[in-house]
Image (cartoon, helix red, strand yellow):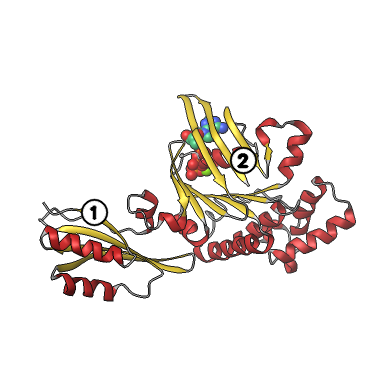
Amino acid sequence: MITLEQVSKTFAARSGPVRALDDVSLHVEPGEIYGVIGRSGAGKSTLIRTVNMLERPDSGTVTVGGRELTGLDGADLRRARQRIGMIFQQFNLLESRTVRGNVELALEIAGLDRAARRARSGEILELVGLTDRAGARVFELSGGQKQRVGIARALAADPQVLLSDEATSALDPETTASILELLRDLNKELGLTILLITHEMDVVKALCDSAALMREGRIIEQGRLDDIVVRTDSQMSRDLFPLGELPEPRGTTIIEITFVGLASEEPVISRLARTHELDVSLLGAAIETIHGKQTGRTRLELSGDAVQVDAAVADLQGQGLTVDRVRDAR
Ligand SMILES: Nc1ncnc2c1ncn2[C@@H]1O[C@H](COP(=O)(O)OP(=O)(O)OP(=O)(O)O)[C@@H](O)[C@H]1O
Ligand SMILES: [Mg+2]
């Protein structure tokens, strides 16, 4: 649904040129929720702004819904852009207009007549749960309600794609959760493809099917969340399961086991010690619910000779578990 190929963008800043996007390629499947995560200044906003050509790349191509936007301008580009909704951290609403007025303005720009605007705004406000606030002015609303107006406005022209730039960063955790839930419902009910930018792993965890990690204008990792969770060499995976620093070397082997959708890892660990006559100690564990599945990672220290350790690891792998040898005994 969204494809970026080798997109680069450099800004001229007073201190010299800033390469905000450096050869970025990315593919978002139809109906997918795709998260881009990274620290401040990584290039996330620049990336998402190239998707609707708010920022024109210096090189590379951007294709949305089968149309190459980098090849369009004027009226063609405006028309293509209409099918791409966007929401922002600071909402970007007309504060003195009513809730309905904000949505209807977007519908007017999309070319609907008065009667159609009234009907459509009613439908959209219902969709985002704001029917009873339709006549309120935006400045009277809470942050969460404002973002619902932002979402309603973004949906006005019936987009295929919704772009979200830190849409929940100005909200408290509870309100964030309710907005994320709304986005998930819209994704399911409307088949809306969502590309979102965030600096919070919690947002990725709660919502995304796929994710990419950006650093200094580059995508340094990407993939489906299901695949990322079982990769211990991945920075995103380490952020999902923070197990802390490794202890000082002390002649032992350290392994990490990733459990996906398993009721409990306890039997696995106690059986390991018994079967292989190893000393097993637990160094750390982290459990997360990802896509509704309990997923956990456990770091274990094994004291035993190389043959015992090899046999234990092979045994765990034979049970279908993902095992990484983080440190071998020396
Ligand atoms: N219009 C601009 N002119 C000059 N430099 C810019 C412009 N827009 C962005 N930059 C620079 O490009 C880099 C990437 O900025 P960008 O806003 O994409 O980062 P970000 O990942 O969204 O950060 P944040 O999490 O703080 O929003 C930064 O170094 C920024 O200063
Ligand atoms: Mg930004």
Q: Residues within 10 Å of mark 1 (few under 14, many from 20)?
A: some
Rendered residue at 31%/68% (across/down): 319
Q: What residue sits right under mark 1 in the picture? A: 326
Q: Nearer the viewer, mark 2 or mark 1?
A: 1
- Residue 199 in view here: no
Q: Quadrant of residue 4?
A: top right
> Disc 2 marks which residue?
51
Q: Residues within 10 Å of mark 2 (few under 14, many from 20)?
A: many
Q: Residue 310: where, in percent of width, then height?
A: 18, 59
Whether pointer 2 and pointer 1 mark residues with C-beta atoms closer than 8 Å, the reply is no
Vertically, is 214 above or below 137? above
Q: Locate residue 27 relative to residue 317 in the image: left or right.
A: right
Position of residue 9 relative to residue 270, above or below, is above
Kind of residue sitting beneath label 2 = Val
**Is residue 211 left or right of 96 when viewed as pictured?**
left
Classify mark 1: helix, strand or loop. Answer: strand
| Residue at figure coordinates x 14%, y 63% from the top left | 308
159 displayed left or right of 210: right
